[in-house]
Image (tube, rainbow, N blue to C red):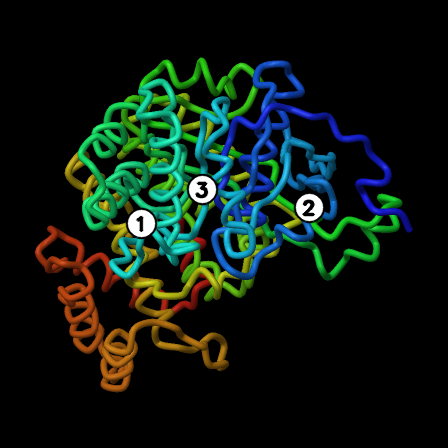
Amino acid sequence: MKKINECFEKKSYREKVLQFGEGNFMCAFVDWMIAEMNKAGYFNGSAVVIQPIEKGRVKILNEQDGLFTLYLNGIKNGEVISEHTIISSISRGINTYSDYNEFLKAAENPQLRFITSNTTEAGIVYEEKDRLEDRPQSSFPGKLTAFLYHRYQFFNGDMEKGFIFLPCELIDKNGEKLKETIVKLAKLWNLEEGFVEWINEANTFCNTLVDRIVPGYPKDKIEEITKELGYEDKLVVEGEQFHLWVIEGPQWVKDEFPADKAGLNVLFVDDLTPYRTRKVRILNGAHTAMVPVSYLYGKDTVKEAIDDPVVGKFIQDAIYDEIIPTLELSEKELQDFAQAVMDRFKNPFIKHYLMSISLNGMSKFKTRVLPSILQYQESNNSLPNRLVFSLAALIAFYRGERDGVRIDLKDDEDILELYQNLWASYDGTRQSLEQIVEAVLGYEKNWEMDLNKIDGLHQQVTDYLEMLLDKGMQEAVQTF
């Protein structure tokens, strides 16, 4: 069978993007967006992909001339859709471990304008052992600083040869942190002040928020896909239909990176904080709140939960009636995002197990759900019933049993020990339940506050927990 690059002719574009990371997410997110902008006639550029770690996929990428097939599966405009396209926005790949000179030479390209990256949350780190003379440096910021210094020297500090940075790492203030790390390395290496000034003045570091689920290479059905495509592609990647890129930076950036003109869900904003909060509270918060309720109800996946008429309505009402009212963005932006979240939960192509979301459920509840409870109470002088019920369900979940079968709880040892001791002392009385709730709500190591001090929370959680244990989840959740 022919390979993908033997079946399709690749169109050449100017290399305008330096991309650190050749993984599935970057292929299904950034490279797809570049391809969409090219298709719409707004960008006319390609990405040269840098392999930032020793073992990667650049060799395969080059063997396929940078081509790969992207499947987008999910709900689009209210319909279940699976569609695929050939992505041809990658010009070539460079392995910094085997071709470091070529990596530095890419810095000499005057048309290179953007730097994107996805080196995981641990990628943007300050590594004191890195040196300018290393070939390559061990860390991503180390390699990047060496690259930037080579460009600075080659163009004699030309202020017109800086970059727009669009990092995709899932950390807060990713652009600012990347810039700080580069400056620290420049000072560690005793590079001249002129270079630090060039970093600060000639370059624009944007903070970004990215959102798209990318399951990756479909190894369990690749034979079926290959037969359908009629060619061999070792880099097939699957992603969901939904995508969002929020870019915090000067408005002129969108003139050079016109993704919004190409119809993409890319927002250029002065402050992405409300959008990060929206994602954490609605998407992640709903995930976390649904887990103990849905799992104890008898469901195993997100889709099963959202499709159930009782649990699904419970989750939807929690989002629309209790989470959205606590957020700052416009009603339309919040409603549209919530609808997209519901569609994503219903995606038949993604099997998202509730138990995988349950990992470290206590700390997740603190960051994703508790802020909605606190804001709701402050605004309404009352507690959000469904979110509080979810907290009661979480305490029941950590009892470690569903229908007589042990739940494989995964959390920090102190959390597991806390619940084990509390539930071991439970004697079936209301007083015993009150003691359990008081201990959990008062566990300041997790909550960083004593939740017992929130007016009415202890009693309401205890009431719901008592109802859960007395009636069972299926009957208890019906009351909502």
Distance from disc 1 to disc 3, alpha carbons, whole Å, reads 26 Å
Look at 20% across and 68% down and name the residue there: 440
* Residue count near mark 2 (Cα–Cα under 10 Å), binned few <14, some 14–19, many ≥20: some
Residue 266, image x, y percentages: 47, 25
- Which residue is the site of mark 1? 368
Q: Nearer the viewer, mark 1 or mark 3?
A: 3
Task: Determine whether the residue tagged by mark 1 lies in a helix, strand or loop.
Answer: helix
Task: Say which element carries label 3.
Answer: strand
Q: Nearer the viewer, residue 71 or 329?
A: 71
Reading the image, the residue beneath label 2 is: 62
Q: Position of residue 309 (x, y in %)?
A: 56, 48
Neighbours of disc 3 within 10 Å: few (<14), some (14-19), many (20+): many
Q: Which residue is mark 3?
A: 117
Comparing marks 2 and 3, which lies closer to the viewer?
2
Q: Is residue 105 above or below residue 53?
A: above
User: Outermost residue toward the left?
Assistant: 453
